[in-house]
Structure formats: structure tokens, C-alpha cells
């Protein structure tokens, strides 16, 4: 059993999809399938159930996932200890961000850090808020950046920036940009949502709550896994959604999106770290580069 096999297993188990795991790891699907087959063959257990094109964790796979994460976390700590001896001349920084932050906010900041510390290998992974919190809590990632609220006492949560939100519609629903929207307007609009666990979805639910509505009260026409797919659906006329202005800006400038006449509160971007794990030198330096006082 190798650490690479464990990383592949965890990637597949978290996504329940071989192709998506391969893409996330930068491997071919055949290499991912071969690694899983080698693990299952070596120990004579089925880690996954293959049901048509669907993949599920077996009982053995569920147990093994916890152990695999712990081994990878321990290996990462050992690697960090060696990197500390070299200062910031070498090392690795494993960061995970929710989609809005990882796509729009983190890249320029990671680039600036890379230019200052070119010997540090940067590893950025994208997930939703819930997935980021789990990765930091398990030790898989040192730092997490999210826009959704996190309720996990194992994690230290610190604000790093503000994000402006907008309720946006396509040209087919441009009437929503011409007047203040009331409860009946919200019921009239079809809605496009991110998946459960997304901070952007939570912002949509909070907006509905201001009109004494829940998702069960409105028409949800699509639920999609990324900000870009949501934005494309709205541009095509699907209905309404809440998006960060970082995501919606291009469509608004081009006129294919309209900002509805509905004020939304500014939300926070949050940094996550485990309270009891010591940050590597690279992680402390990155936190400092964001203008924050790094914790030990």
C-alpha cells in the first residue's frame, strides 16, 4: 500500500466518481481505476459498489476512508516537519477554497505569494463550504477559505475579506430589475441553486427568509454544482439566483445578466484552520501575506 494509492482512494471516496477524482488529481481515469483495483485485490475487499454508472462506498470502504485520511494527515505533518528545516526555501502549502473564493479571490493572492516564495509548492483544491471545513478538520488541508458559515468547534474561523452579493436574472426576466421585489415576485420567479453545503445556496436561503419563504415554497428549476454553471443557466433564461459580484460581473457588463432590484447584505470570506494543529512556516507566511497576524 502506498500513499499515492491512499490519496487516490480518498479522492474517489469523497467524489464517488472515478473521472472527477482523476481530474482533481491530474491522473488518467485508467490510473485511478488501477490503483483502486490494486488495493481491493491486495486485501481481498470491495471498497466500492459499482451499480451501473453509479459508485457507492462499501461498508469496508467507509471504515477505510477514516483510516486513510488519518494516515495522509500524519504523512503531511511529517513532510511539513522536514520542510520547516529548510525555512521558506522549500515546502508545500495545501489550501482548499469554496468555489467563489478559489476561482476569483485566491488566485491573485497565491500568485503574489509564489512570486515571494517560489520554492513553496502550492496545492489548491476546490469544494463547497462543507467540504472545505471537513478537509481542514481532518488535517487533509492546512488552510481553508469559505464564504459560508462554519459551525465546527475544532476550527478557528477568521474573517479575511467582504463579498458583495446580487440577485441576478437573465434578459427573459428583466422585469425583476425594474422594481422592488416583494414576496409574490419571489414566488413568481423560477430559481437556480447551487448544491447543498454551498455558501452561495445558504445566501439564497437567507434572502428567501426575508420574505418569509423557504426553498419548499418557491419553484426550483435547476440545482447545479458550480457558480459558472449557475451563471450560464441564468444567462440562458432559467430564472433567478444569488451570486457573488465576482462571479456575475462579466455577465452584468455584457448585459446578459440583470441585477434585480433587491438589496442583499455583504457577506464575509472566512479563513479556517485547525485549532490544535501547528501551522507550517509556509501557512504562517501565507496568512501573514493576507494582512493577518498568523497563529503558531
Image (cartoon, rainbow, N blue to C red):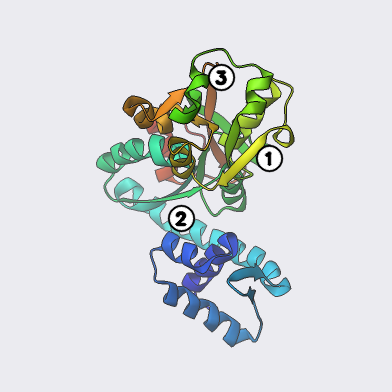
> In the rendered image, which quarter is residue 114 located in?
top left
Residue 293 in view in this figure:
no
Q: Which residue was labeled with disc 3?
A: 264
> Residue 177, percent across and down?
49, 18
Image marks 1 and 2: residues in contact by CB distance under 8 Å: no
Name the N-terminal-most of marks 3 and 2.
2
Residue 90 in view in this figure:
yes
**Left or right: 165 with respect to 274?**
left
Q: Which residue was labeled with disc 2?
A: 81
Disc 3: CA contacts within 10 A as few (<14), some (14-19) or many (>=20)? some
Specify the label residue 128 is tagged with.
none
Q: For mark 3, give the secondary structure.
A: loop
- The nearer-to-camera label among 1 and 2 is 1
At horizontal 40% and vertical 41% (from top left) the residue drawn is 103
Image marks 3 and 2: residues in contact by CB distance under 8 Å: no
Q: Which residue was labeled with disc 1?
A: 152
Amino acid at each position: 500500500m502506498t500513499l499515492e494509492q491512499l490519496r487516490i482512494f480518498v479522492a474517489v471516496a469523497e467524489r464517488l466518481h472515478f473521472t472527477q477524482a482523476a481530474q482533481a488529481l491530474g491522473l488518467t481515469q485508467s490510473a485511478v481505476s488501477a490503483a483502486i483495483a490494486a488495493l481491493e485485490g491486495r486485501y481481498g475487499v470491495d471498497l466500492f459498489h459499482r451499480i451501473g454508472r453509479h459508485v457507492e462506498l462499501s461498508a469496508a470502504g467507509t471504515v477505510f476512508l477514516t483510516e486513510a485520511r488519518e494516515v495522509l494527515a500524519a504523512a503531511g505533518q511529517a513532510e511539513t516537519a522536514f520542510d520547516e528545516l529548510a525555512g521558506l526555501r522549500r515546502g508545500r502549502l495545501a489550501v482548499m477554497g469554496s468555489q467563489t473564493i478559489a476561482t476569483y479571490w485566491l488566485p491573485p493572492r497565491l500568485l503574489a505569494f509564489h512570486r515571494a516564495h517560489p520554492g513553496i509548492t502550492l496545492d489548491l483544491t476546490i469544494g463547497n463550504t462543507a467540504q472545505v471545513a471537513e478537509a481542514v478538520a481532518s488535517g487533509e488541508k492546512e488552510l481553508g477559505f469559505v464564504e459560508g458559515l462554519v459551525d465546527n468547534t475544532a476550527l478557528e474561523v477568521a474573517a479575511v475579506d467582504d463579498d458583495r452579493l446580487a440577485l441576478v436574472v437573465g434578459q427573459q426576466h428583466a422585469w425583476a430589475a425594474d422594481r422592488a421585489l416583494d414576496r409574490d415576485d419571489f414566488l413568481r420567479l423560477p430559481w437556480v441553486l447551487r448544491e447543498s453545503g454551498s455558501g452561495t445556496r445558504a445566501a439564497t436561503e437567507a434572502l428567501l427568509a426575508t420574505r418569509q419563504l423557504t426553498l419548499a415554497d418557491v419553484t426550483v428549476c435547476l440545482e447545479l454544482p458550480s457558480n459558472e454553471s449557475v451563471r450560464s443557466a441564468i444567462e440562458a433564461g432559467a430564472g433567478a439566483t444569488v451570486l457573488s459580484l465576482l462571479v456575475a460581473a462579466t455577465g452584468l457588463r455584457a448585459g446578459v445578466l440583470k441585477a434585480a432590484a433587491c438589496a442583499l447584505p455583504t457577506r464575509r470570506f472566512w479563513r479556517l484552520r485547525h485549532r490544535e494543529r501547528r501551522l507550517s512556516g509556509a501557512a504562517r507566511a501565507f496568512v501573514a501575506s493576507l494582512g493577518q497576524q498568523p497563529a503558531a
